[in-house]
C-alpha cells in the first residue's frame, strides 16, 4: 500500500458511529458535534488507519497518498 499522506473526514457524511475512534483512537476522536476529527494523522500505523477508514459504515473517511491520489475508498 502507498503511504497515507492525508486523511479527510467528510463531516456531512459522518454519522458519529465511531468505529474509527475505536479502531484508531490515536488518530480519530469525536468532537462536540459528534463528528470524527483527525487529532493526529500519525497517531497510528498505516494498516490501522486503513482499517479505521474501512470500518466507517458510511465511508466518510478518505485516504490520500503523497501525490494526492485517493487510496481509499477505491
Ligand atoms: S466511523 Fe465514520 S461515521 Fe463513524 S465517526 Fe468515524 S467517520 Fe464518522
Image: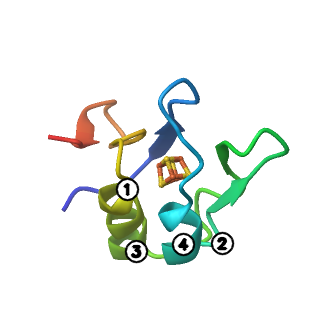
Residue depicted at x 72% and y 53%: 30
- Callout 3: CB less than 8 Å from ligand 1: no
Q: Quadrant of residue 71?
A: top left
Residue depicted at x 34% and y 42%: 59
Q: Is residue 31 left or right of residue 52?
A: right
Q: Where is residue 37 in the image (x, y as percent from the top left)?
A: 67, 46
Relative to 13, is 63 above or below? below
Residue 26 has which mark?
A: 2
Residue 48 has which mark?
A: 3
**Residue with the mark numbered 1:** 53
Between the residue at mark 2 and the residue at mark 3, the CA separation in whole angstroms equals: 10 Å
Packing grade of label 2 (10 A; few <14, some 14-19, many >=20) is some
Q: Where is residue 44 in the image (x, y as percent from the top left)?
A: 54, 74
Q: In this view, does 69 lie to the left or right of 55?
A: left
Q: Check the picture and name the quadrant holding the C terminus.
A: top left
Q: Check the picture and name the quadrant holding the N terminus.
A: bottom left
Amino acid at each position: 500500500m502507498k503511504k497515507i499522506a492525508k486523511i479527510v473526514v467528510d463531516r456531512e457524511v459522518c454519522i458519529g458511529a465511531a468505529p474509527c475512534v475505536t479502531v484508531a483512537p490515536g488518530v480519530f476522536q469525536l468532537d462536540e458535534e459528534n463528528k470524527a476529527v483527525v487529532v493526529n494523522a500519525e497517531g497510528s500505523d498505516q494498516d490501522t488507519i486503513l482499517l479505521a477508514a474501512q470500518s466507517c459504515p458510511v465511508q466518510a473517511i478518505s485516504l490520500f497518498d503523497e501525490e494526492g491520489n485517493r487510496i481509499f475508498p477505491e
